[in-house]
Amino acid sequence: MNGSYNFLFHVIGFGLLSFIFLGGYFLDRKLRGEKEWAMKLYLAEMMRKLGIFSPIVAAVLLITGIGNIHNRLMGVDLSWYEEGWLVAKVILFAIMLVNGTFLGPMMSRKRAGLIKAMVEKTGTEETEKGIVALNRQITLFYAVQGILLLAILYLSTFGPGKHPGVM
């Protein structure tokens, strides 16, 4: 079986992305179940620290993905945009990247600020309502990101093309 280091790093990058996604999801669930505001703030900080690695993992996936496309089409009279499954995968990754780079951190920062206000006893009933609303938005965020992640995994695994790491 032939393979490439590029493909190996791509698979490792996907594993790290999955770890960050699942870690954030489980920390979010723990944060919602927590009764103490100080512990909620601590969990929000942990989520932020975990999310710091997302751009690094996204860059690894982007670079190795381009390398995989190059390896796959080397010596073939075919362009990457002529393969529908690959175009769909690139589009889904781009949506996931934009969603995870801008929307997720923005909602998390806003929620952490509201939780901090509750810890400092400066929050009101409106602050709690804001936290509940952000919790709903973050639930939708994780649902969308999870669907995109599974769709990318499906296209990678069961797509009609043979992946470059397994030639």
Image: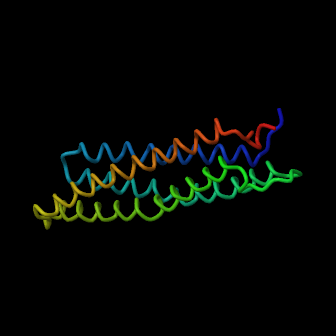
Q: Answer with the quarter of the image where residue 121 lies.
A: bottom left
Residue found 23% across the figure and 45% down from its top? 34
Is 141 on the left-hand or right-hand side of 2?
left
In-front residue for pair 157/38? 157
Q: Residue furthest left?
A: 125
Residue found 71% across the figure and 56% down from its top? 81
Residue found 69% across the figure and 53% down from its top? 65
Q: Residue furthest right?
A: 75
In-front residue for pair 66/9? 66
In-front residue for pair 15/116? 15
Residue 84's spot in the image, x, y percent? 66, 49
Residue 42's spot in the image, x, y percent? 31, 54
Question: Which quarter of the image is occupied by the N terminus?
Answer: top right
Q: How many marks?
A: 0
Is 107 on the left-hand or right-hand side of 148?
left
Residue 133's spot in the image, x, y percent? 23, 57
Residue found 81% across the figure and 51% down from its top? 73
Coloured how? Answer: rainbow
In-front residue for pair 36/112? 112
Residue 61's spot in the image, x, y percent? 63, 53
The relative height of residue 120 versus residue 91 in the rendered view (above or below) is below
Is 150 on the left-hand or right-hand side of 116?
right
Question: Which quarter of the image is occupied by the C terminus?
Answer: top right
Is 30 on the left-hand or right-hand side of 162?
left
Q: Residue furthest bottom?
A: 122
